[in-house]
Image (tube, helix red, strand yellow):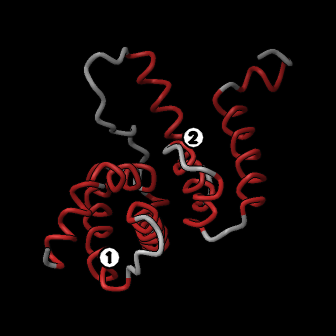
Amino acid sequence: MSKEEQFVNLIHENQGLIYKIATIYAKEKAEQDDLYQEIVYQTWKSFDHFKKASKPSTWLYRVGMNTAITHLNKSKKQLNTLPFDQVTIQFSESIDSEKEEKIQLLYAQIRKLNLLDRGIIFLFLEEKTYEEIAEISGISVSNVGTRMSRIRQKLKSEMNPKSTTDGTR
């Protein structure tokens, strides 16, 4: 199989992963599309350096998240002036509006996290182990655990502000 065929297969098998990274790190649909393309481009540029020491998806997470963070840092000034649009995520028609609203609220709260914490919670939601998150993000497993605890607490308080003020759950 040629290099190009291997690359196309990798992208095809992981297009959902790339889309999710773009959705977590970009606010508007056009920006998500641009970020998706940038991740694919950066993956192609570094494809020759993939040593297959880790799973292809682990490597792709790292390339995708690094690309997203770099992309955001380059356009940080512009991002601060853009109005916040609601998250557009493709869900099946069967999801009720209340559940969709909660999911949109969760994504909005995740976007308020710093870039590293955004990536950590994204990987956690992708059901990655702390060890895999550590490998992808380049931090220690214990640091992942500490950050996850803080992220959960922050998201819980933001999603349910009543529970932090009156002591109820």
Residue 49 quadrant: bottom left
Task: Judge whether 50 appears above or below 63 on screen.
Answer: below
For badge 2, the amino acid type reads Gln
Outermost residue to the right: 167
Depth check, mark 2 against mark 1: the one in front is 1
Q: Is residue 44 left or right of residue 116?
A: left
Indicate the position of residue 55 as horizontal and vertical percent values: 43, 64
Indicate the position of residue 11 as horizontal and vertical percent values: 24, 61
What residue is rendered at 49% in x and 39% in y?
Answer: 107
Q: Which residue is mark 1?
A: 42
User: Where is the N terminus found, in terms of image quarters?
Assistant: bottom left
Q: Tag 1, which secondary structure?
A: helix
Q: CA distance from mark 2 to mark 1?
A: 28 Å
What residue is rendered at 59% in x and 58% in y?
Answer: 133
Q: Which residue is mark 2?
A: 109
Indicate the position of residue 67 as horizontal and vertical percent values: 42, 71
Residue 81 quadrant: bottom left
For badge 1, the amino acid type reads Gln
Which mark is drawn over residue 144? none
Q: Is residue 77 left or right of residue 90?
A: right
